[in-house]
Image (tube, rainbow, N blue to C red):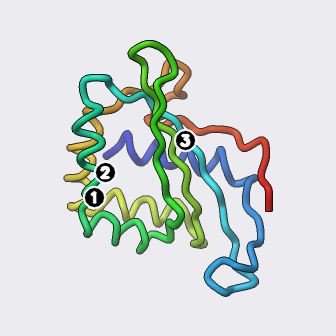
Amino acid sequence: MKRTLISLTLFVAGFLAHSFMDSSAMGNPNLTVTRFGWVIELKPEMIRKYKQLHAHPWPAVNAKLKDCNISNYSIYMKEVAQGKHMLFSYLEYTGTDFEADMAKMAADPETQRWWKETDPCQKAIETAGEGEWWSTMEEIYHLD
């Protein structure tokens, strides 16, 4: 859990500059949406398990994500070199205290149980920062 909280703090620091006002988000013209993009390696021997887990995500985990003001969450997979697979994650955060929401998620027993299933499938990339699991990506373009 300590690794998760450190990583989530790094995510916040890396993406505060990517907030924008989205008048269509949940019908609220004053809603601030922060976009996040992350990357991590997927262990080749775990691809099948990872896909199966995400084909049938646990309802309590999905509910906790929404409860923590996360929406439009997607994970993509790509083989980037022979036998090397990467995961790209994108989400939008619509809350007002990302660190508190991520701490609430990290404290959730069902989410912790989910991470015990998914974390062994993943491997931090070589350029990951200190304590970083999913590596923060820099947003360089966004079309409104």
Task: Tell which circle, 3 or 2, labels the residue nearer the N-terminal end.
Answer: 3
| Whether residue 35 is situated above or below residue 71 in the rendered picture | above
Q: Are marks 2 and 1 in contact (CB under 8 Å)?
A: yes
Which residue is at a point 58% across and 39% down the rendered structure image?
136
Q: CA distance from mark 3 to mark 2?
A: 17 Å
| Whether residue 41 is situated above or below residue 68 in the rendered picture | above
Q: Which residue is mark 2?
A: 54
Q: Quadrant of the C terminus?
A: bottom right
The residue lying toward the viewer, choosing from 21 and 42, is: 42
Residue 137: image x %, image y %?
63, 38
Q: Which residue is mark 3?
A: 38
Task: Provide the secondary structure element on which disc 2 rests.
Answer: helix
Q: Residues within 10 Å of mark 3 (few under 14, many from 20)?
A: some
Left or right of residue 88, residue 65 in this image: left
Task: Provide the secondary structure element on which disc 1 rests.
Answer: loop
> Looking at the image, is mark 1 or mark 3 nearer the viewer?
1
Q: CA distance from mark 1 to mark 3?
A: 19 Å
Q: CA distance from mark 2 to mark 1?
A: 5 Å
The residue lying toward the viewer, choosing from 3 and 53, is: 53
Q: Residues within 10 Å of mark 1 (few under 14, many from 20)?
A: few
Please tell me the numbered disc located at residue 57.
1
Which residue is at a point 52% across and 35% down the rendered structure image?
39
Residue 55: image x %, image y %?
29, 53
Residue 133: image x %, image y %?
43, 35
